[in-house]
Amino acid sequence: MSAAPLLQIEHLNVGFDTAMGAIMVVRDLDLVLEEGETLCIVGESGSGKSMTALAIMGLVPEPLRVVGGGSIKLSGEELVGASHRRLRQIRGKRISMVFQEPMSSLNPVFSVGEQIAETLRLHEGLGRRDARAAAIEMLQAVGIPAPERRVDDYPHQMSGGMRQRVMIAMALACRPAILIADEPTTALDVTVQAQIMDLLKDVQRRFGTAILLITHDIGIVAEAADRVIVLYAGRRVEEGSAEEVLRRPAHPYTAALVACAPQQLLLGGERRILPEIPGIVPSLLRMPPGCAFAPRCARATAECHAKAPPLLELSAGRASACWLATELGR
Amino acid sequence: MRLANAILQRLCNAILLIAAVIVFNFALIHLAPGDPAQVIAGEMGGANAKILAEIRHAYGLDKPFLEQLWIYVSHVLRGDLGQSYYFNAPVAQLVAQRALATVLLVFSGLIAAIIFGTLLGVFSARRPRGALSHGVTILSLVGYSAPVFWTGILLILLFAAAVPIFPVEGMMDPARTGGGWIGRAIDIAHHLVLPATSLGIVYLAQYSRLARASMLDVLGADYIRAARAKGLSENVVVYKHALRNAILPVVTVAGLDLGRVFAGAVLVETVFDWPGMGRLAYGSILRRDSPTLLGILLFSAVIVIIGNLLTDLAYRLIDPRIRTSA
């Protein structure tokens, strides 16, 4: 081993205690993010993907918290249990986050310029004038036309796509090593989605930022990801390079997600009914004893219902938590 | 430029509104039962029909309604609010003497309530399940239900009888000599504490509740999470990003209260013998002293209109969304 990875998560557990026992939102998650790469975390609502992002930021909302002996290391520095002060120095400076809702993630009473400049003044110690100039530069960098005029605009004067550009400008203002993007295009029109994805790829190339992209959209994974982690009910079910995982899913859940993507229809060229995955994600209070996906899985056996499969390494960087993994992954 | 336009537009509205208030007030008082001439005659020790007619003639009460209205309006336009039947002094002078006392009482009570209420609300919203939060809930329930005069009497019992540290009545100590204007200001402030507190408690309850709810709402907003994700300290998140948004409902209600609070002042002024307009108004109603009453109503209307104007401006200052839409 040479230098520590940029971001390394080991045995991350997020949950809270209730009268009915501990409820775990994220279970035993391992993850490595290297400099300059794009890692996608894919999963349905409730799979724990957003909570993973918030755990990295140290912003897990009450009553949830990081439990167990999990570890989140940024270039070797432990973030779990780090002081609030230290975490605040890292947030917005080393690790930034872009949220799903650009319409409500900007403060309505401050101009977008002020909101970008605020980060720069906080972390870079810039004066008012320098911060403003840097904010204009950032607006330019994220492709906002006439930035020296738009810098004084308030969020309500901008469209959703523009606001998401502002969010990205704000997140990248201090040139963070890691950008966490939590469903950054979900709330946007399709054409704007493509623009925002292009922008993310563009700034990654220019600034060398590593991107942790959280999405439920398998199309975005295909488009943007180097590697992908598939989460189901708080657990990793599959991991590998994006290309391999999409081409030869080694978990029935991933296979089903890929089959559900409308892009498949376009590629196939034939008209057929878009498949769906029957059922819903199990309640965190009533997790099945075996594989969490077994109740919805077409290929589930008695073994699947009885015993949860471990995450099996299939090849270097490629893993699946399915009893049928070796059979599927070929 | 936009701001100047907005102010100008509102001032024009205000002038029309005041004109309407003058006419409606006069009509309402005229419709009200009771005969000023009877009261004046009563003060003189009784009279017969002839003397009553003379009084009516002397005060112009025998003229037709529209003529009386015209006389009143034209006088007001010239800055003459008329002569009090009871005090036999110019109404403008009577109101001016008492206006300052009432405005002082009302504003210090209301502003203290807004500031402390908002702070209490913010503190309790930061720990919605904490002891302070429950305390604020109880305080607001009690404070809001307790009538102003009752809180006043309790305060007198507590701070003037049991622990006599504040004066009970009046606005100044008549026996005090020397000390200059600073000494006088301190003396007035000392007299002001109990009346302003009893007036303010009701509003404190209301504002702490309002600010707490509004703050809780805002603290759950996406932009607050985003602000935390920028690495801002909790105090900056709460007092800069959240409070600026959460204060809007407080400003709205403060504007409305500015009108209501004068009504509460009557009771407080009575309990604490405060030489203000509320008691003058009450007395004038009983005495059918309509010129004085009209003067007070006009003054109140002007205060309410100024209050609304200020609320409007404060809103534009705080919320950019209003700046562009107007």
Image: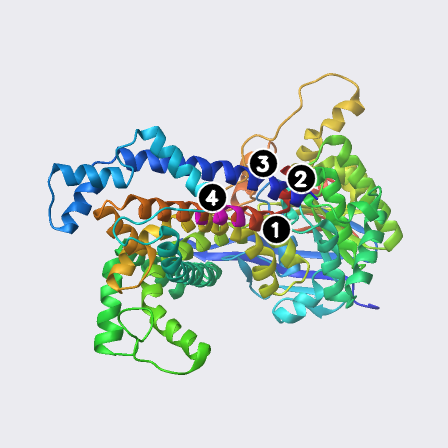
Estimate the x, y position of residue B155 in percent, counting from the top left. Answer: 26, 68
**Residue beneath label 2, please?**
A216
Which span is picked out in magenta? B303-310
Residue kind at label 4, given as amino acid type: Arg
Residue B317: assigned label: 1
3D distance between C-alphas at marks 4 and 3: 94 Å
3D distance between C-alphas at marks 2 and 4: 74 Å
2 or 1: mark nearer the eye: 1
Instruction: Please tell me how crowded label 2 is: few (under 14), some (14-19), or many (20+) other residues with Cα within 10 Å.
Output: many
3D distance between C-alphas at marks 2 and 1: 41 Å
Residue farthest to the top? A271
Dot 3 lies on which element? loop
Q: Nearer the viewer, residue B39 or B220?
A: B39
Q: Is residue A254 above or below residue B167?
A: above
First-in-chain label (4 vs 1): 4
The answer to whether the residue labelled 4 contacts the one labelled 1, judged by CB atoms less than 8 Å apart, is no
**Residue beneath label 3, please?**
A300
**Residue B304 magenta-highlighted:** yes
Which residue corresponds to the image point at 54% horizontal and 47% vertical from the top-left?
A307
Dot 4 lies on which element? loop
Q: Is residue B309 at least partly visible in the picture?
A: yes
1 or 3: mark nearer the eye: 1
**Residue beneath label 4, please?**
B78
Dot 2 lies on which element? loop
3 or 2: mark nearer the eye: 2
Residue kind at label 2, given as amino acid type: His
- Whether discs 2 and 4 lie on one chain: the answer is no
Estimate the x, y position of residue B316 in percent, counting from the top left. Answer: 60, 47
